[in-house]
């Protein structure tokens, strides 16, 4: 399962775009999509490509020439929405993709379906999305190009789930999952966890993107959180912290925030427990790779179920992080 994101920089600003892609890669992004609104952006792709080492997908709308230019400048893939490019022009895109060995993602969105399909289904229903996807898949395959991925995104979670279920029953083509226009981080995390999570649990999907308004780096943590929760990929830290109640006698909010900030971007999987009281704390912490179970002013540092030492509250973060770094180093040596 591959995690993807998209830059929010102006692609024509090569330095800013490269910087953001490197930040995304450091966070765990494995494929990045960039907007290509004009020929200046397409030309910038060559310099961007030289400075990064993860695949680039060029996002193309309306102007087929931008797809041709993007492929000429070395992108590994293009994303096109057939609803806004004429068929005769798309044939030229297919011919170029075959010549360059470029993967094409056919991106079907509820907001840009073909007019005849919208009329037939009286709106962007799940079946409308699937019919558009299957029609366009047949068009591309008839034109002789099989290096294709499909997506049928919607901002409505139920429609998205139904569409991907129906689509997966009709084709073995790789599917890219996502809830489009999902909103700010809380709403996006909820919608994506439900939509993407249900489908992945059913064995549907090959690549994913969690769409969040704002800094795309935040998408990566949510994406890997979904994969960890389902046991699909164990990448990065899995932080377990109690919701707190009247029994909590330490500043668990600060501890959790500090630890989350310090381990952001860590690739190694560790189950880290941050517990605020002596009721469930010791038991939960003992089940983790490493953790703290707190009491008034002090806590116990656990490692693999064993108490390591008693720690003062003001030393929680430093002590825990030192132990995490030690465990990661030990794993790399074995």
Image: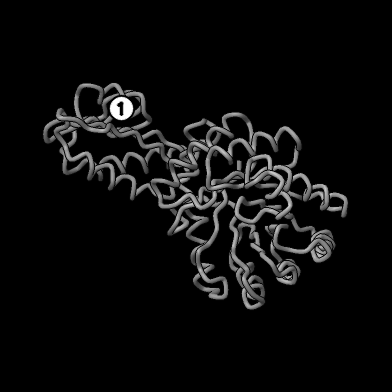
Q: Residue at x 36, y 28 (%)?
A: 288
Residue 274 is at least partly visible in this image = yes
Q: Residue at x 58, y 40 (%)?
A: 159
Q: Residue at x 39, y 33 (%)?
A: 271
Residue 177 or residue 280, whichever sits in front: 177
Q: Please state the total of marks drawn on the protein image.
A: 1
Query: Where residue 221 sits: x, y (%)?
Result: 45, 46
Q: Is residue 42 above or below residue 255?
A: below
**Tag 1 secondary structure:** helix
Q: Residues within 10 Å of mark 1 (few under 14, many from 20)?
A: many
Quadrant the N terminus occupies: top right
Image-based side of 239 in relation to 277, left or right: right
Q: Residue at x 71, y 70 (%)?
A: 63
For disc 1, the marked residue is 285
Query: Where residue 254 sits: x, y (%)?
Result: 22, 45
Residue 77 is at least partly visible in this image = no
């Amino acid at each position: 399962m591959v995690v993807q994101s998209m830059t929010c920089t102006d692609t024509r600003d090569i330095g800013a775009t490269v910087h953001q892609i490197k930040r995304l890669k450091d966070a765990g992004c494995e494929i990045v999509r960039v907007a290509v609104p004009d020929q200046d952006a397409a030309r910038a792709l060559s310099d961007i490509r030289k400075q990064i080492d993860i695949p680039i997908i060029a996002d193309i709308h309306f102007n087929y020439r931008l797809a041709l230019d993007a492929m000429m400048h070395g992108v590994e893939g293009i994303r096109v929405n057939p609803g806004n490019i004429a068929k005769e022009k798309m044939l030229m895109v297919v011919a170029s993709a075959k010549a360059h060995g470029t993967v094409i993602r056919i991106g079907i969105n509820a907001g840009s379906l073909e007019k005849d399909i919208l009329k037939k289904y009286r709106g962007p229903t799940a079946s409308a999305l699937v019919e558009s996807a299957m029609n366009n898949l047949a068009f591309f395959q008839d034109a002789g190009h099989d290096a294709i991925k499909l997506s049928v995104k919607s901002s409505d979670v139920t429609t998205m789930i139904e569409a991907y279920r129906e689509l997966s029953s009709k084709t073995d083509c790789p599917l890219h999952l996502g809830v489009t226009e999902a909103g700010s981080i809380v709403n996006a995390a909820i919608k994506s966890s439900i939509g993407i999570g249900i489908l992945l649990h059913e064995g549907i999907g090959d690549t994913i993107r969690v769409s969040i308004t704002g800094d795309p780096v935040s998408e990566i943590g949510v994406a890997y959180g979904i994969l960890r929760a389902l046991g699909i990929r164990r990448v990065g830290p899995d932080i377990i912290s109690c919701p707190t109640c009247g029994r909590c006698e330490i500043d668990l909010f600060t501890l959790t925030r500090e630890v989350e900030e310090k381990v952001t971007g860590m690739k190694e999987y560790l189950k880290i427990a941050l517990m605020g009281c002596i009721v469930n704390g010791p038991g939960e912490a003992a089940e983790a790779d490493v953790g703290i179970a707190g009491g008034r002013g002090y806590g116990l540092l656990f490692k693999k179920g064993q108490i390591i030492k008693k720690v003062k509250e003001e030393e929680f973060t430093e002590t825990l992080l030192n132990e995490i770094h030690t465990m990661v180093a030990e794993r790399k040596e074995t």
